[in-house]
Image (cartoon, grey):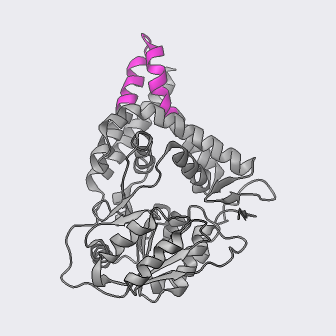
Amino acid sequence: MFLLSLIILFVALALLGVTIWNAVSWPRVGSAIPATTATGLSILIPARNEEENIGDCLESVLAQGEAVGEILVYDDHSRDDTSRVVSKYIKRDARVKLIKPEPLPAGWCGKTFACARLAQQARGSWLLFLDADARLSENAVARILAAAEARGVTLLSCWPRLEMLSFWERALMPVLNFVVFTLYPAPLAARRSLDPSLGLAHGSCLLARRDIYETIGGHTAVRDQLFEDVRLAQLWRRHGFYSLCLDGQLVLTVRMYDSLGEIWKGFQKNFFPAFRRERSFWAFLLLHALFFLPFALAPLAFPGSATWTYTAAAACILSMRTALAWRFNHPLWSVLLHPLGEAILVALGLTSWMRFKLGRGVEWKERRYSQRSRNGERSEKSSGFAGDTVSERR
């Protein structure tokens, strides 16, 4: 037990260093607004059953001014009044257009096909993909474009500020940033611009230069990916082009999920597919199981020699959460619920694996995604779901 506690403490100390580095040094999309702003940018919004979100999203987009040349919304077979809401904005501003849906082809995920169709219809030299639950702040488009041009980036993603209103959002959503920014060295990614392993993106806000997007194949190249944003960023770098993910809290707000059930379904959909290799998935799950142990075993170790190491490891983990709470403006009380978050994280990972490997897959927005391959494993050379099936309820 003492040796295990030392291993956990050593790992926690190392990742605390990464976390503090991210919290202090990760570049932001700045607040400065350029004197001149390029025009002709296309904003592209895939929308499936988004009647409650699309209006506020379009309001924030229309407030961006002349930097936006056109606003295309793909109504992805919505069963609600998404198209009716968009039609109101079409009458209000000629830049807004509604793209009618086409049947989802075999081998595609719903969002990737929607984004590909939007890109085909767009005319701008820059393409800004936005989720329907994204809200842009004042002059956000000008600031995002300025950041891309200043850094010589042809694919720029902005990590949003998470809007969290309910108890479960505030308790669990900060774990997303904990999962990413305890392991991912964001400042290093800005320096090592062509390392594919450091490609990162948040699909709620993705700015792409059109010519490069078309050169690498765009969303067609990641058509079978549920984790398409990160895969696109990695592919961008693999082709020798510069992609970057910046802290975009000053320009973008997203409310990803509004209940415990939505959080569970949303992350279950992406958890196992996030890993290209199954052994990486199990290593990640083991790490977070170990991060739960100090909180469970420290009281049991008393008065044994492992007490101080488990306590120190728990303190390191809570320090990581505190540093990220400072950077991302998370509620501090959620830090104290970290053991609950870790337990739910591990449970989510296991159920995601079981659904994809042993069950019928996961359902998201009335589509079911499942993975089947002849040997039961994902190929390390594959971009994602070998033998994927996508079924849709009508």
Q: Residue at x 40, y 50 (%)?
A: 181
Quick one: which residue is furthest to the top in this view?
303
Q: Is residue 156 left or right of residue 115?
A: left
Displayed quadrant of residue 172: top left
* Residue 9 higher or lower than 206, as above or below: above
Q: Would residue 24 be seen by someone viewing this image from the given angle?
A: yes
Quick one: which residue is furthest to the right in this view?
374
Span of residues in magenta: 290-315
Q: Is residue 219 left or right of residue 177?
A: right
Displayed quadrant of residue 129: bottom left
Disc tally is 0
Viewer-proximal residue, 191 or 65? 65
* Residue 241 higher or lower than 245, as above or below: below
Viewer-proximal residue, 144 or 153? 144
Q: Residue at x 59, y 38 (%)?
A: 347
- Rendered location of residue 72, percent (x, y): 47, 80
Displayed quadrant of residue 331: top left
- Rendered location of residue 122, percent (x, y): 48, 86
Q: Residue at x 27, y 73 (%)?
A: 143
- Rendered location of residue 228, percent (x, y): 55, 66
Q: Residue at x 54, y 34 (%)?
A: 289
Q: Would residue 244 be seen by someone viewing this image from the given angle?
A: no
- Rendered location of residue 132, percent (x, y): 46, 66
Q: Main secondary structure of the magenta part?
A: helix
Q: Is residue 12 left or right of residue 349?
A: left
Viewer-proximal residue, 214 or 110? 110
Quarter of the image containing the C terminus? Answer: bottom right
| Residue 92 inside the magenta-drawn segment | no
